[in-house]
Amino acid sequence: MTDTWQDDSLVAMRSKPASAGRLSGRERTFSILGGCLCVGLGMRRHGIGRLAHLVVGGMLLSRGAAGYCSAKKALSANSYEQDMADAHDWKSAKVTSRSVTIDKPREEIYRFWRDFTNLAQFMKHIERVDVIDARRSHWVASPAPGKHLEWDAEITDERENEYIAWQTEENSDIHQAGWVSFRDAPRGRGTVIQAVFAYEPPAGYAGHAVAKLLGRDPGTQTGDDLRRLKQLLEIGEITTNAARPGAQRGGR
């Protein structure tokens, strides 16, 4: 199971989130040509037919010029989530990806993240992370007042100063896999961190909907956590109202 995840799922996780929704050169060309054709036909018509052709033509032209299609992204995301569910024998899967640029060297940020005991400083719902050995760790979370969750996770792949990948162990109450990558930002502006999480929602998609309604959607959490990490590493403290008590301290 672990080998399959490293060889197949990890490669997919690195490529699909970034490319989802992007159009190929041929797709952009057909969109622009189709848009021009629809606009041309619309100019020759009257009434509702004219309006319909002009609207569709404008959408196609915009799609081709931008090189991006939200509908294609949605379809790709759904297919990707099904692939992740199948790879891990989950009933369903949700995948979220967030990134942030931090004005610190890549090596420094990697070292900070690799020491998992640091993660509780900026991950709002994580109470602590206990390192078991070089690859395994024990996590304690508090998703809501009076509620506690615990699970064990294992590093499945890593490359120093570039990425770390992990997944929860099979007997965990939470089923999750993911990776975080570190790359130099353009023009020496620090480091771009991208975090991708795949997880099985409790009670399937209904559980995910409830979690989102309550403001505990992992996509929102991930973005907020990365913003807190940026503050912690750049200025040495977390200044947002979302900071956990005791987390407003430097991590180095």
Image (spheres, rainbow, N blue to C red):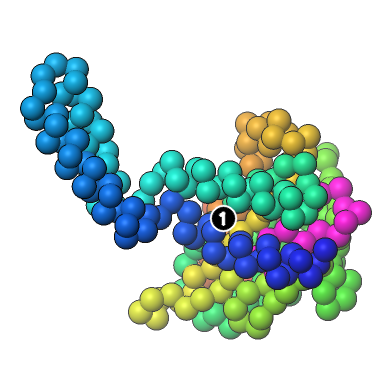
Q: Position of residue 116 (x, y in %)?
A: 75, 69
Residue 97: quarter of image = bottom right
Between 30 and 102, the one nearer to me in the picture = 30
Residue 132: quarter of image = bottom right
Between 72 and 49, the one nearer to me in the picture = 49
- Asked whether residue 236 appears in the rendered view, the answer is no
Disc 1 is placed on an element classified as: strand
| Magenta-drawn segment | 165-179
Q: Tell me what residue is drawn at x 59 percent, y 47 percent.
A: 79
**Residue 181 in magenta stretch:** no
- Asked whether residue 213 appears in the rendered view, the answer is yes
Q: Residues within 10 Å of mark 1 (few under 14, many from 20)?
A: many
The residue at which mark 1 appears reads as 97
Between 181 and 205, the one nearer to me in the picture = 205
Q: Position of residue 96 (x, y in %)?
A: 59, 51
Q: Tell me what residue is drawn at x 87 percent, y 76 percent.
A: 133
Q: Tell me what residue is drawn at x 65 percent, y 32 percent.
A: 209
Between 162 and 147, the one nearer to me in the picture = 162
Looking at the image, residue 145 lies above or below residue 129: above
**Residue 175 in magenta stretch:** yes
Image quarter hosting the N terminus:
bottom right
Q: Position of residue 14 (x, y in %)?
A: 58, 65
Image quarter hosting the C terminus:
bottom right
Looking at the image, residue 116 lies above or below residue 39: below
Looking at the image, residue 135 lies above or below residue 172: below
Q: Residue furthest top?
A: 47
Identity of the amino acid at label 1?
Ser
